Amino acid sequence: MTDSSPPRKIRVVLCRGQYCNMSRRADALLKRLEPLIDSVNGDQYPKPVKLEIANCLSMCGAGPNLVIYPANVVCNHVEPDMLDEIVEEHVRKPLEGPPD
Ligand code: FES
């Protein structure tokens, strides 16, 4: 292998715990988040972005919560209409790397 840089990987972890999913609000986030992540991954294999579900991220009072690794971006009080910007800024752009 000639490219020594490791493949970029991003994990998006959405909490669906008791508090974050009160009134199924985390489910609403998941419904919106899945196609956004699918769009970023496209037909790449292996997929650079993995969407994971957590049972609690230990910050229930600030929920619904979402964390993006490895950058450790913590998003609190997430609403569905915030997800486009979150994915653009913290998932799509980091995968594309710094602008030339
Ligand atoms: S239930 Fe989501 S952080 Fe605890």
Image (tube, rainbow, N blue to C red):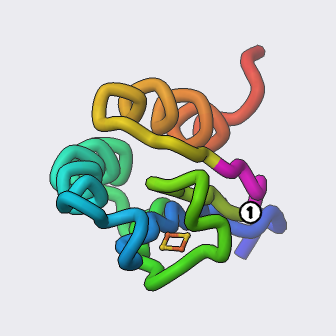
Magenta-drawn stretch contains 37? no
Q: Residue at x 35, y 58 (%)?
A: 44
Quarter of the image with the C terminus is: top right
Query: Is residue 50 something one can see in this rendering?
Result: no
Q: Position of residue 82 (x, y in %)?
A: 41, 29
Indicate the amino acid at tag 1: Pro
Which residue appears farthest toward the bottom when viewing the image? 55
Q: Residue at x 75, y 68 (%)?
A: 6
The overriding secondary structure of the stretch rendered in magenta is loop
Residue linked to disc 1? 70
Q: Position of residue 16 (x, y in %)?
A: 36, 72
Residue 10 relative to residue 100: left or right: left
Residue 27 relative to residue 69: left or right: left
Q: Which residues are magenta?
A: 70-74
Q: Position of residue 32 (x, y in %)?
A: 21, 45
Q: Residue at x 83, y 67 (%)?
A: 4
Q: How many marks?
A: 1
Query: Is residue 64 something one can see in this rendering?
Result: yes
Q: Is residue 28 above or below residue 50?
A: above
Between 26 and 48, which is closer to the camera in this rendering? 26
Q: Residue at x 46, y 80 (%)?
A: 54
Q: Position of residue 29 (x, y in %)?
A: 28, 50
Q: Quick one: label 1, few (<14), some, or many (20+) residues within 10 Å?
A: few
| Residue labelled 1 has its Cβ within 8 Å of some atom of ligand 1 | no
Between 25 and 93, which is closer to the camera in this rendering? 25
Task: Please identify the quarter of the rendering in which residue 93 is found.
Answer: top right
Which residue appears farthest toward the top when viewing the image? 100
Residue 4 relative to residue 10: left or right: right
Quarter of the image with the N terminus is: bottom right
